[in-house]
């Protein structure tokens, strides 16, 4: 079952991978979206894929998740409260105060605002899962992944994990840069941290430690503050190189994500804002990619309509790689159903001691064993102290964000925004929240200042 089936890249990729996997022959896939047309279009595309492949798989559209939930084995969430326009506002509102963000969907003020909208809805979904499909595994893709999974696991007993392709994508790029693309299956890598700031702890080819080779390539190819803008990953990335030099481990998943965790890459050296059209550290390419991704949504929908109606072949649309996530979901679902165990590179779940020097309740990204007994995070040991300090501070800020979202507490929301390294002061935090309430309407009205009659009912 997929809730948020209107995802223009993920949903077609998921349907393609399910159709191509014999484990799910005879299954019914329920596609749920508040937009009835979106759910119906996706179901029609899925039916055409199944027919073309000769697969016995049924796709059924819904607008009511409770109608679809009874008997569900795996429930996946890809919701986006406010859709593409909401994401755009999460970038535009902080920009009024000189705050540039490269993605704005996980951390930074945009990540906080997104969590305030997503957490209540995802917890409501999880409560319905507990009521109607208590044996189901919940898999969340919606950002901010860490805050969302933390909220669901804190408030419900539903087994829940978060998935993100970013760490695997970084590993593939590093392997390619080291000339190991053809030997990727022989490479051992261990990543651990928080989603969108995960650190490569161990990197080996057989008995060979690959870190010295990686360090030499980074030193040779990476730029600095004046690096040209880039939207491709690899050892040339300036922010990742600087973090490697500073903390002794290489971060994932690429500069446009990891830069937002720190106060010094997206702020000028005198503490003022930066020009969001000329970002330093090569970050302009990443921000431009985010804007393009938001703007291409309407074009992708037209192509999906054409696929549903038979004017184009029923194949997944081109995207930024998010469709690769479906491969991992299907692989995990197959392991849960068949009991055939395998280890996933990176899964987001409650820490519970996997990283002993991070808060035990924090949601961390670590390797995990998947099989008939569910998904179990694997212990990786303590992180280097400075990295643990960075991640602990972020985990505590995200805990404030989660509590603000669950309670509709304006004071906690202001504190969460003020503690973000990109926000220069509590006053700016309050102004961002007030502007966001007016821009987003009813989805943030719980956080309006007392007496503010400019909050609206429009989403």
Image (cartoon, grey):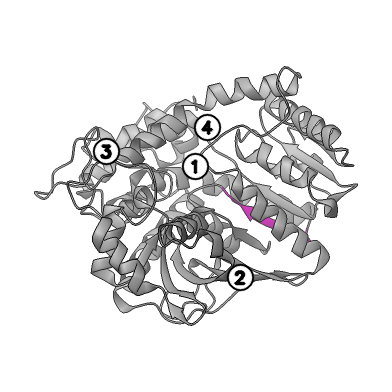
Could you say whether the residue bearing mark 2 is in a helix, strand or loop?
strand
Dot placed on the residue nearer the N-terminal end, 1 or 3: 1
- The answer to whether the residues at label 4 and label 3 have Cβ atoms under 8 Å apart is no
Could you say whether the residue bearing mark 4 is in a helix, strand or loop?
helix
Residue positioned 44% across, 79% down in the render:
208
Q: Residue furthest left?
A: 270
Q: Say which residue label 2 marks.
A: 368
| Region of the chain picked out in magenta, as a range | 134-141
Question: Splitting the image into 4 quarters, where does residue 272 fall?
Answer: top left
Rendering coords of residue 337 (x, y %):
81, 62
In screen coordinates, is 115 left or right of 335? left
- Is residue 293 found inside the magenta-colored segment of the image? no
Q: Say which residue label 1 marks.
A: 117
Q: Say which residue label 3 marks.
A: 431
Q: Say which residue label 4 marks.
A: 83
- The answer to whether the residues at label 4 and label 1 have Cβ atoms under 8 Å apart is no
In screen coordinates, is 399 left or right of 218? right
In screen coordinates, is 264 left or right of 402? left
Dot placed on the residue nearer the N-terminal end, 4 or 1: 4
Q: CA distance from mark 1 to mark 2?
A: 29 Å
Viewer-side label of 2, 3: 2
Residue 151 at least partly seen: yes
């Amino acid at each position: 079952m997929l809730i948020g089936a209107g995802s223009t890249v993920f949903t077609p990729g998921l349907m393609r991978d399910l159709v191509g996997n014999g484990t799910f022959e005879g299954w019914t896939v329920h596609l749920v979206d508040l937009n009835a047309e979106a759910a119906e279009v996706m179901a029609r595309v899925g039916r055409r894929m199944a027919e073309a492949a000769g697969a016995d798989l049924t796709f059924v559209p819904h607008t009511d998740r409770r109608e679809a939930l009874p008997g569900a084995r795996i429930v996946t969430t890809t919701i986006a409260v406010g859709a593409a326009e909401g994401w755009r506002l999460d970038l535009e509102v902080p920009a009024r105060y000189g705050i540039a963000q490269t993605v704005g969907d996980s951390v930074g003020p945009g990540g906080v605002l997104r969590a305030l909208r997503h957490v209540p809805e995802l917890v409501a979904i999880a409560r319905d899962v507990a009521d109607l499909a208590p044996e189901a595994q919940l898999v969340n893709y919606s950002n901010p992944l860490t805050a969302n999974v933390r909220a669901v696991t804190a408030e419900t007993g539903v087994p829940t994990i978060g998935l993100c392709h970013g760490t695997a994508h970084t590993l593939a790029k590093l392997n390619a840069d080291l000339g190991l693309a053809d030997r990727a299956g022989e490479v051992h890598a261990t990543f651990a941290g928080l989603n969108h700031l995960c650190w490569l702890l161990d990197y080996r080819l057989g008995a060979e430690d690959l870190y010295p080779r990686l360090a030499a390539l980074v030193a040779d190819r990476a730029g600095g503050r004046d690096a040209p803008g880039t939207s491709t990953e690899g050892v040339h990335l300036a922010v990742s190189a600087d973090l490697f030099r500073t903390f002794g481990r290489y971060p994932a998943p690429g500069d446009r994500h990891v830069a937002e965790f720190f106060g010094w890459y997206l702020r000028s050296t005198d503490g003022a804002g930066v020009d969001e059209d000329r970002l330093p550290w090569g970050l302009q390419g990443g921000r431009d990619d985010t804007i393009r991704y938001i703007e291409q949504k309407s074009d992708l929908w037209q192509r999906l309509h054409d696929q549903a109606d038979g004017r184009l072949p029923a194949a997944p649309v081109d995207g930024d790689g998010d469709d690769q996530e479906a491969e991992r979901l299907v692989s995990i679902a197959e392991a849960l159903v068949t009991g055939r165990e395998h280890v996933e590179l990176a899964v987001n779940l409650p820490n519970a001691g996997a990283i002993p020097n991070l808060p035990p309740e924090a949601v961390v990204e670590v390797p995990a064993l998947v099989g008939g007994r569910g998904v179990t995070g694997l212990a990786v040991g303590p992180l280097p102290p400075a990295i643990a300090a960075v991640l602990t501070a972020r985990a505590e800020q995200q805990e404030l964000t989660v509590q603000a979202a669950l309670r509709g507490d304006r004071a906690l929301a202001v504190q969460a925004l003020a503690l973000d390294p990109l926000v220069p002061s509590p006053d700016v935090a309050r102004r961002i929240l007030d502007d966001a309430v007016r821009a987003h309407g009813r989805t943030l009205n719980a956080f309006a200042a007392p007496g503010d009659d400019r909050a609206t009912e429009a989403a």
